[in-house]
Amino acid sequence: MQIIPHCALLAFALALHGCYRPAHVADFEKPSALQRFEVRDSMNRTIWQLECDGRSTLSAIDHGVLPIGCTQVFPVASAPRLFLPGERLLLIYTAPREGTLRFQQHWGKAASDRTFLGGSYLGGPVGNTRLEELFVPGERPIDRDYPRSREQ
């Protein structure tokens, strides 16, 4: 007879009761209809980019799994690379809400090869800002714009 570790038993029991949820690259407080979603590495290089229809609502996004209503723009012909645990990441996305296009920039780190652990964030209405200005890759390391006053 094989002895199963206590943590495995606990995860199995929680899964049976519907309480266990695997971690995602993005979890939204309430279902969101995204227009664009990107994951950037510490040097502000795009790891994964999605263009979405702005109508399909998403509660979460799993790294490398194409959500309904979205098209993968980058990488063009392959899955996005896996994260390096502990690597600094930046999520950027836009979503229409209450008649206004809003953006979110969320700094954090990789908790595993497919999951994001968020830290500080900045968001608000896009307003007069052009989307190209929000999504400029490779200009500078992401830490330069990291809002340290909100650091946890």
Image (spheres, rainbow, N blue to C red):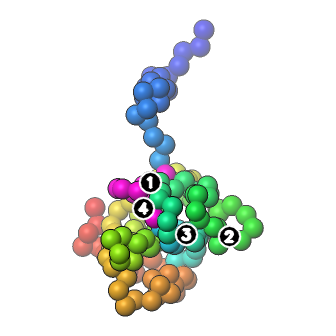
- For the question of whether residue 25 can be seen, the reply is no
Mark nearer the N terminus (3 vs 1) = 3
- The answer to whether residue 101 is left or right of residue 5 is left
- Considering the numbered disc 3 on the image, is that residue within a helix, a strand or a loop? loop
Image quadrant assignment for residue 31: bottom left
- Considering the numbered disc 2 on the image, is that residue within a helix, a strand or a loop? loop
Q: CA distance from mark 4 to mark 2?
A: 23 Å
- Considering the numbered disc 4 on the image, is that residue within a helix, a strand or a loop? strand
The residue shown at (46%, 64%) is 33
Q: How many marks?
A: 4
Return the mark for residue 75. 2
How crowded pointer 3 is (Cα within 10 Å; few <14, some 14-19, many 20+) is rated as some
Mark nearer the N terminus (3 vs 2) = 3
Return the mark for residue 59. 1
The residue labelled by disc 4 is 32
The C terminus lies in which quarter of the figure?
Answer: bottom left
How crowded pointer 2 is (Cα within 10 Å; few <14, some 14-19, many 20+) is rated as some
Magenta segment includes 26: yes
- Place of residue 9 in the rendered image (x, y in percent of width and height, measured from the top left): 47, 23
User: What range is drawn magenta here?
Assistant: 24-33
